[in-house]
Structures are given as structure tokens and as C-alpha cells.
Image (cartoon, rainbow, N blue to C red):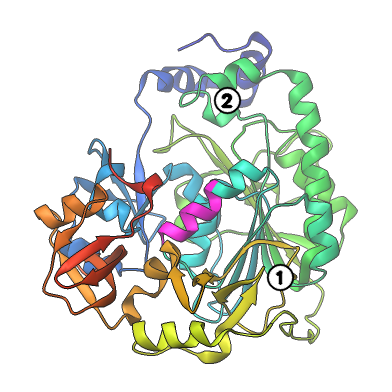
Amino acid sequence: MKRLPEKYAERMKILLGDEFENYVNSFNDKPVRAFRVNTDKISVEDFLKINPFTTKKIPYVENGFYFEDEKIGNHPYHHAGMIYVQEPGAMMPAECIDIEPDWRVLDMCAAPGGKSTQLKNKLGEKGILVSNEIVASRCKILTGNIERLGLKNVVTTCMDTKKLARIFPETFDLVMVDAPCSGEGMFRKEEVAIDEWSPENVENCTVRQAEILENAVKVLKDGGYIIYATCTFSLDENEKTVDEFLQNHPDFELVRVKKSVEKNTCDGISFEGCVSKNINYTRRFYPHKNKGEGQFAAVLRNTVSSRKSTPFRCNNKGKIDKAVYDFLDSTLKGYEKEKVLMHKETPVYFTPDFSVDKATAFACGVTIGEIRKNYILPHHQFFSAMGDDFKRKINLAPESDELKKYLHGEEFETDCENGWAVVCVDGCTLGGVKVVNGRAKNHYPKGLRMK
């Protein structure tokens, strides 16, 4: 462990008082590892019946578990998107409030997708998630995680928050602002965060955080919520940013988090000049007091009475090639025809009442596949997200030779009838194959295959 920056250590001594030594000693502990069960694919109850890992329940996350196993990312359940490995402290902000299943939710700073996928698990079939990441390379990783987990009704975008505010005015019931920060809460896990820390960086972060929050206000519906989160301990980036926001926005209030989160976190800290009397409603997650890395969260609610919003209508339906419907009819037991849309000349499966301009979305809904001459070459996401509706399924055991072959990109023998089929492990879709005369021809993406 590298030595903490002197100015940072001085500040933390003042902040933590007698607890400072406990905080420093926590750096000798191993980082805590955890995962969430992807309830869009399998219920927690059903997962626990087949759970092969050494786990313990996270008290504030209904589908979250600490684990001790090694190389969990190579397990077939991970490949199948049954689980998402995520630092347990980072799970806290999305658990702060109850989320309604029909909400429209925006995650403003989303990559690699932990909080986005957590939020999507709380939405029903009518709920919509827009997951944004400004850096294109990170947006690809974000989109890949959403595809692996087989999530529907998700749009990924790649833009700054100012552009989001122009495109989606007064649109969302909830905005997650997992703001870029100085990363003090990650010092134990990522030593590079220590190298990059400086008082100047903290100051620069506060300016950027305030700007992002202003844009979050513009995309929020009346009566909606903003969850502001960081992975830092700085008063300037946390309580002071929240207090200043509330002073500038008297129509917002700071609200208490759910009891389960409150019980497993510490109160926010008041400071000289603090105007907000209930700043203690903000939450702090410390590595010496909680199982996980550092985290901060605050829930801000727009108190303006909700006005009736104008529903979106899709303006990019486009002409659907007959081959798309023929493909869907031959592969799926059933689907909603009105959800078959065109996005960037590619057929997708997405809700028709939320308009996404072709130039806006990095990815939109479930990509069905590529239109070739008179046929469709299906996309991996189509298998992952639509697997439950497939007519042809090949269910394999986690330890089977066939599954090992599949994950390595090889063909295997099957008694499944000819046509496109999904490969499942314990009932959850891994990906797809094309069955031809007893041979399952592999369509698992090369980038996901086991080496």
C-alpha cells in the first residue's frame, strides 16, 4: 500500500477523529468482493437453489451477495449473465429509494454498468433505462455488459450531460448521477487513485459535479428524484456540493434513504456554513466500518407537483424487411410485433412509445441481427435477451463437455431440431447456435469465448 498523500491524511484525521487509525488499518484488509443476481434472467430464489459459490447475503441489497470464490468470471453462470460482479459499496446508491417498475430512469455516468444493470433489475417490462457514458470506448464496455445480462428496454448513449439535457427535457422519474470524483474511496482497491489525487483535482471535480447536477435537473420530471453518488470522502465533493445545490434549487429537498441503507451506512457530516438542516440524511460508506470501498450518496427530490407529461412516440419506425418477421416467426414462440423497429438500418426489439433518434443512441433495445440477402444473421444480444421465448432450446449442465465446447467456440452434437436455437445453462441463456443435422454450429462471440 502506497503512503497516503499528506494533505489528504491531514483532512481525514479531522474528518474521522478517533476513527482515523481504524481507517488506515483497513488498508491491510483484502477488498470485499460481491455480486448481484440478475433478476431479469433468474429470481434470487431460483438462483439460491443452484448457487455453487460460497456466499453471504448483503443486508441492504435484496439480490446482492458477498463471495469468496476465485475466477468467478469464468463460471458459466457469469457467461450466462446470471450474476454481475460489483463492489458492494457501489451497490448502495441504487438501493436508497424504492423504484417503480414503470419509471423512466437515466444513468448519466454509467460505465462499466454496475449501477445501470442494478437499476434495470428494479424496472418492469414497461420501465425504460437510458444508460449514458461520454467516453466511446467505455460506452462499448457498458453496452457489452447490458447485452451479456440480456436486458430489454435499455438505450445506451455516448454524449456529455449538456447534450442529454437538450435531447431529453423533463423526461425521467429518476436520474442517477454517479459523478466523476477524486476517487478517495477507492484508495485501498486501486493504488493508481492515490497517484492521481491532489487538492487541485478535488476542486476540479466539484466544478464538474455541479455542472452535471444542473443538467440532471433539466432532464428530470416534476416530482422526480436525483440520486447523487461519489466514491470519495471529500466534504467539498459530497455534503458541500449537495448543500450548494439545495441553496440554488429551493424546489428540491433532501430525503431520507430506505431503512436498510440507513442502518448500514453513516450519517452525512455537517460543516461550518451548512444551510441544510438535514444534511445528515446523506449517507457515507467507509471501508473501516462497512464491507466495501468508500461511497457517498444523497437523494434529492423535486417537490413540484407532477404535471401530466406528453408521451413519446417512436419517429424512426422505418420499413421492416419481411425477412425480419419471417426470422422472428421461425425462432420465437411469440413476440409483440409493434416492438419491432429499425435503428440505424438494423432491426431492434424496443418499446414503441419512447422515441430515440438514430443519431442519439449508441445502441437501442435488443439488436435482432444483421439483414443479409433474404435472411437474418442474429446478434448475440437477441439470444441473450429473448432466450425465454425461443422455440428451440438446448439446456446444458454447468459441468458438461458440450458446455465447455460451446464456451470455447466449438461445435457439439445435439438432438435438437434444425434451426436457430439458444444454449442454456440451468435454464438461463448463454448464447446461440444454428443446428444443422445434429450439429450445433457455434455463434458465441469470439470476444467472450474462454481461452
Does the rendering let one see residue 180?
A: yes
Residue lying at 68% horizontally and 79% vertically, measured from the top left: 354
Q: Residue placed at 61% from the left, 21% from the top?
A: 12
* Residue closer to the observer: 24 or 185: 185
Assign the N terminus to one quadrant of the image.
Answer: top left
Q: Position of residue 226 (x, y in %)?
A: 70, 59
For residue 326, side relative to residue 30 (left or right): right
Q: In the rendered structure, which segment of residues is drawn in magenta?
A: 141-149
Classify residue 5 as left or right of residue 327. Answer: right
Q: What element carries label 2?
A: helix
Where does the C terminus fall, quadrant-wise?
top left
Q: Name the residue under label 1.
A: 172
Task: Estimate the x, y position of residue 421 in percent, counting from the top left.
Answer: 28, 73
> Could you classify mark 2 by the number of other residues whose Cα lies within 10 Å: few (under 14), some (14-19), or many (20 or more)?
few
Q: Is residue 422 above or below residue 14?
A: below
Residue 16's tag is 2
Instruction: Judge from the rendering whether residue 161 lies leftward or rightward of residue 352; answer left or right.
Output: right
Magenta stretch: includes residue 432: no
